[in-house]
Structures are given as C-alpha cells and as structure tokens.
Amino acid sequence: MSTAVSPLAPNDVPDMPEIAGVRLATAAAGIRYKGRTDVLLAVMDKGTTVGGVFTKSKCPSAPVEWCRAKLKRGGSRGAFARALVVNSGNANAFTGKTGRQSTALTAQIAAKAVGCSVNDIFLASTGVIGEPLDATKFDGVLAEINETAAPGDWMSAARAIMTTDTFPKVATATVKLGKARVTINGMAKGAGMIMPDMATMLSFVFTDAPLSGAVLQSLLRSGVEDTFNAVTIDGDTSTSDTLLAFATGAAAANGAPKITRAGDPRLKAFTKAFNDVLANLSEQVARDGEGARKLVEVVVEGAATKASARKIAMSIANSPLVKTAIAGEDANWGRVVMAVGKAGEPANRDKLSISFNGIRVARSGARDPSYDEAEVSEAMKAPKIQIKVALGLGKGRDRVLTCDLTKEYVAINGDYRS
Amino acid sequence: MSTAVSPLAPNDVPDMPEIAGVRLATAAAGIRYKGRTDVLLAVMDKGTTVGGVFTKSKCPSAPVEWCRAKLKRGGSRGAFARALVVNSGNANAFTGKTGRQSTALTAQIAAKAVGCSVNDIFLASTGVIGEPLDATKFDGVLAEINETAAPGDWMSAARAIMTTDTFPKVATATVKLGKARVTINGMAKGAGMIMPDMATMLSFVFTDAPLSGAVLQSLLRSGVEDTFNAVTIDGDTSTSDTLLAFATGAAAANGAPKITRAGDPRLKAFTKAFNDVLANLSEQVARDGEGARKLVEVVVEGAATKASARKIAMSIANSPLVKTAIAGEDANWGRVVMAVGKAGEPANRDKLSISFNGIRVARSGARDPSYDEAEVSEAMKAPKIQIKVALGLGKGRDRVLTCDLTKEYVAINGDYRS
C-alpha cells in the first residue's frame, strides 16, 4: 500500500485553536496497526450538546446504531455528550451480537474513565468490516489517556482516526455569535468507500457555541447537503459513515447567546462558518480519494431541477470511464455524454454543452468547431479539473466533487486486507 | 493497450453453420483502425423480419435512433430488413446533425449496393463517441463487398465489430420448430461501458425460422432480462447498446411453421435455444470485460422479490471495492455487506449469509465460526468466482454476471483515445 501523501493535499495546514470545553487524547491500542495511534478520546465538559448524521446503509455498523440510539434517547430536547471514542483499524461493522457487545463494553470503559453515564458516550469505528473488535483493548487505555487529555492537539487526533488516508484532515473557523467570538474545529477521515449519504466515513466537528442539540441537528442536516453529500470517491457507501457535531457552550461565559431554535437569525454567520468547515473537510476527503491524482469538480447547470442536476453530476462523478479518462488526462467528453445519458434524468442531447476547465469542447450536441485539442490537452494536466455540463433545459444547478480513478486505487483496494 | 486475449476466453469456439438467407462480408474501410476490418455487411433475403432492443440512455447514438425509427415504421405488423451495416472505431454518437446525416448516407450507400429501400437497412456503430463518422468511407466499399458476401464466415464478421474486445464472440444453436430443424446464430461485442439496459454494446442474432417481427420483438424483450440485462462490467451505459434479431424465414421451405403470435406453444423449444444463445453471448461479454481476470457470478437469494434481488446483485456487481477485492483474490465479504447495505433494498444485517465459491464465510450477520481463511484464499484463486448472498427474507432470487476490476481496466480506459 502506498504511503505517499496525495499530491492533492492542501499546502497549508491551519493552526487549530483550542475549543473551550474539549480535551483530546490519542493512544496506540493495537487494534490492527503497528507503530501508530489508533484510538482517539475526546472529552467534553458537562452540558455539551450533540447532533449526528449517518450512513443510509441498510447494514450499518454497531457504533452507528449506538450513536443513533443515544441521539434518539435525547428526544426533541436533544442529546448530550461527555466523550467521543473513535478507533481506526476495525469498523466493528457486520459483527453481529459481538459488535453490539463491543460498543457496550467500549462505552462502559469510556464512561468509567471519564466519570459519566454510558448514555453520554459517542462511538465511531473505521477499518476492516466483519472482524470482531476486541474492546478489551480499550481497557486501561482510555482511563490512562483521559488523565493526559488536553485541549490542543487536533492534528494528532485527526491522525489517529486515519485508515488509508494519506494526510490528516482538519479545518477551523472563528465567527461572531452575538457579540462573542466562537470557534468551530473539525476533523475528518475518508479515502475510499465515499459516497452519499454520508460522503465521509467519519467526521467530527466541535464548537464552543451554546447551541441546543436540536440546533446542531438542524445545522448538520442542511449543511451536509452541498458538502459531504456532494462528494463521491467510488460510489460505494460505507456501513460506518458518521458525522457528529458537539457544542460545549463554553462561549456563553464570554456572552455568546444560547441558541435553541434552528431558524434563529443570530445563527446566520455561524451557519455560514459551520458550512465552510464542512465544505473544507469534505473537499479534503475528495483530495485524498484512494489513488487520486486529480481533484474533479463536476458542475451541472441548466437542468430541470437542482435534484436532477445532482443526479446527473453524480452519474458523471461515479462513472469509471469518466474517471479513468481524467486519470489519462483525456478530455473525453463523449464519456461525459454517456454519463449524462445513463442518469435517466431529462436531457436533450442536441442542447448539451460541455467544458473542461473553462474550455468548451462540445456544444449543441456535437463537437465545438473551435475546439483545439492541444489547448485542451494542456489544460487536462492541471491537478484540478472542472467538468461543466450545460443542459439548456431549466435553472437546476449543482456541483459535486470527486477524484480520478487510477491504477493506484486498484492496487490499494486489491490489497487492503493482505 | 493490451492485445492479449482474456484468460477467461472460452476454450472452444463453435463451428458456426450457415443461416439460409444470410450472407456476410467484411472490409477495412479505414474508419479508425489500421490493418484490420472495421465494417460488417450482413445481407438478408427479402422477407426477413427484424426486432431490436436498445440502450436506455437519454443520449442515444444516431444509429440507435435510426433503427428505432425503422422498427417503429413497421408498426404492429413488424419491420423487415434487407441489410445490416455495422462499423467499429466510431460510435457516431453525440455527433448532432452530422450524425443523422452519416446514418442517412450510410443507409443510402447500403441500399444502393444491396438494391433495396433505405427503410430496410439497419445500422450500428461502436467506438469513439463525439467524433463525426465519415460515411463517405463506405462508398464503394459496401457495393464491392456485397458482391463477395457469402453465407459462411461468422468469425470474420464477429471480428470486424470488435473494439477493445480481446476475442470474437459467437454462439449457435439448432432446434426443432415444428418438424423442421432451424438454426440460430449470434455474435456480440462488448468489453467496457457494459451495463443494462442493454448489457452489451452490440449483438446480432440471425435465424432461418419463419418468425414475424412482432414475435422476434417479444422474444428479445423477455430474453434479455436474465441474459444481457444481467451482465455488468463497470456500471456505465453505452449510448449505442443494440441487440438486433433477424429471421429470414428460409426454413419454411423445409416445413417450419410460420409463427406470428408471441405465445405460440410451438415456440417453446425455440425460445429456450434463443435464450441460450443470448446467455452464451452475454457471458462472453462478461468474460471479456476490460482488463478482466476473473468471471464473477453474483447470486442473491432470499430477497423480498426478484426485482429486489436484482438490485442487490447489481449493487454488489458494480461495487469498485468488491471488484478490486476479487482482483486481489480476497474473499472480502465485508465489502459485500457494504454493497448489500447501499442497495437500499430490504435487508436484515443479522440474517445475512455470504459464500464465496460455495464456502460460507459469514452467517447470521457475522463471521462464520467455521470459516477457514486458508481454504477460502485457495478458492479465490479460481478464474470464476461465485458470490452468493442469502438474505433470509423471502423467495426473491436473481443472478448477475460481472468481472473483477484490475489495473488493466484503468490502463485501457485511461489511454483509449491517445
């Protein structure tokens, strides 16, 4: 398996500020990997609210079921959280009764370490599916690292949750809520098996803003639509996709108002910053698609509706023939037409226009007469490729991010377990 | 691009008998390739009936639109055909007005050569999308090869329509219709961009049985369901997928009864033989999937319905993660669970059982305790892999064929145009 960092990794890694009320610690529990950390413990102050969105898989992992149950338990009032435990190396998915026992045991160990109810523990696991997760490996480890947990080390946290990721993914934003500054920090891990809904396997966002669980839930539901749910790597949907958001409320001490209603106008700037963090993290997921050499942005406009534009964009973004063409630096718009055609959405072949990185190669259902092969070939060498399709039917527009499909993807996934 | 024959190519190539009333000829028209034939002319005797099924793409190729119009023209009485012209190298798809002019000109040239109406000409093209097809290249060529067209050379015909196929695909059957023997010959080309509906880009079936166009149409519609429509290579749907069937009726001279009603009980044996030819050809398409090293049969049973079983089987067969695992000879049933989960069909994780080549690796939603990694690893080395998923919900069962996803697929498709 390649260990080289994706050439699409961001050049600048942000300085991650502390979030009041959040402490982080990592450890090497020996779940699967050798010589690296594989467990993250995030400890939150009392009163921290939580929201979450999860995979739509009909066969979700045990931790996904655990988190869903805890959120449901919170009811309309919203749920609270005191700790998040994430392990890499084993997804605890399709592990039957053993899987449920593992989540229960992990939560017990964490609850004892932190000193709270198991109902305040949130869990996520990523890695191999179908292998039992030995939760006894957390025994001792969580209690020990709870002692050393500290506000600062977000990069180590992001690193502990990686599987085939080639770089840790973090993002941050600060914004005014009322008259107080509040902070939003996020981390994500992705790489393969990335497809709505959710797009990333695991992502966690923390803020010191005083938001109710219901508000967090609402922010997540609308925020993922054009961020995590608009990213696809290979069209495969994980059993484990999880995005959790935690709000400690510590900024209330600085005068930040408590927000308990989703539509509160004071949330406007916060919502934008929150969505920016989600967009940043989800783009990093696409930039670290397994074997990716090109970031691909698919823009569809002129569709009948936004939903129709999304389906067509996803059809293009998930087409192996389009993705291999991009890997070959080939502006193969014929394959884009194929992908438009197979989406099953309203499309009129003779009204289609297609551009690669701003160069129109096809219009009115045929090759653009002004299309210069040399110019386009040069443009296809760029690390970011935008495919824009104009359907000429209506006002529906959408945008999806993906990456190219390379031999390296096959190598990584043909050799993952061995 | 690799030119090695697929290791999954059938060992035995059938002797293809003549079909009375069908003459074949091929030529090198220089559409795209050098040093090989790229055009097939099949000339049929007067009175030959025709049926066809086509891609469901919303952006079909010009020849698909041509054939559909000619079939429609036949109305409920059915359409007739005097010639089929197929070229490889250029799909005449997404070529706008020029594309329609190319089909019209090709049909004119063929009609003049054969001496019939343009309405009796059927067309198919395969190859690059979006490049104008210069139909003037057929001028002279079709008239010349019409002179030399002869009943026998089915292999040359199958070879002329290949693109990235590594072997020509033919199948034949003889069967009694009434008291007369009738013959069914078929050819296909596939390789990539293979997904229902249709599953193959191009396939042509010929028989001397006296069947009306309506009967042929009915045979095709029901015959493709579990053959061509149950094969997928990469989930991509061609703009050009075409399956045409021609019946010369010449066997009437030997006493074969004329069949004009789809439900005619005398058709029973013929229908089976016809479906066998379709099944044989469609399996060959899977065996020649681009870069394929393994033939993969996905069997889903115990689903809520057959349609549900089909969706789940297709979700598994189209999953890049499942396909790369097979390429890596890894019995990664966790990814099979993932693909079941993402299908969106009724499934109960804790009732799932999964086998690879008859070895059960998972049952009741977890690893089978008797699962022996060494035994399964050995089994995964076979050239044909059966993935069987038992859902334990109902009586729905279905089967889909596909192949593995290898680096060679990426190489072929990342370098197709250059």
Image: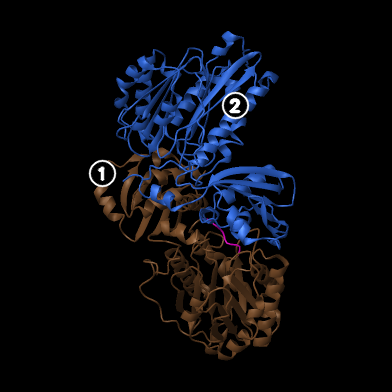
Chain colours: A brown, B blue
Q: Quadrant of residue B210?
A: top right
Residue A63 falls in which quadrant of the image?
bottom right
Q: Residue at x 52, y 24 (%)?
A: B185
Task: Answer with the quarter of the image where residue A297 lies.
Answer: bottom left
Image mark 2: chain: B
Q: Is residue B224 above or below residue B148?
A: below
In the rendered image, is residue B16 in sight?
yes
Q: Tell me whether the residue at label 2 lies in contact with that at label 1, contact meaning CB atoms closer than 8 angstroms.
A: no
Q: Which segment is the magenta one?
A: A235-239
- Are the residues under badges 2 and 1 in a single subunit? no
The amino acid at mark 1 is Ser
The residue labelled by disc 1 is A370
Q: Which amino acid lies under the numbered mark 2 shown in the image of this protein?
A: Phe
Front-most of residues A324 and A29: A29
Which residue shows up at 61% across the image and 76% down it?
A: A50
What residue is disc 2 on? B274
**Lateral position of residue B134 relative to residue A406, left or right:** left
Q: Nearer the viewer, residue B298 or B193?
A: B298
Read off the chain for label 1. Answer: A
Predominant SS along the magenta part: loop
Q: Answer whether residue A216 is magenta in the image.
A: no
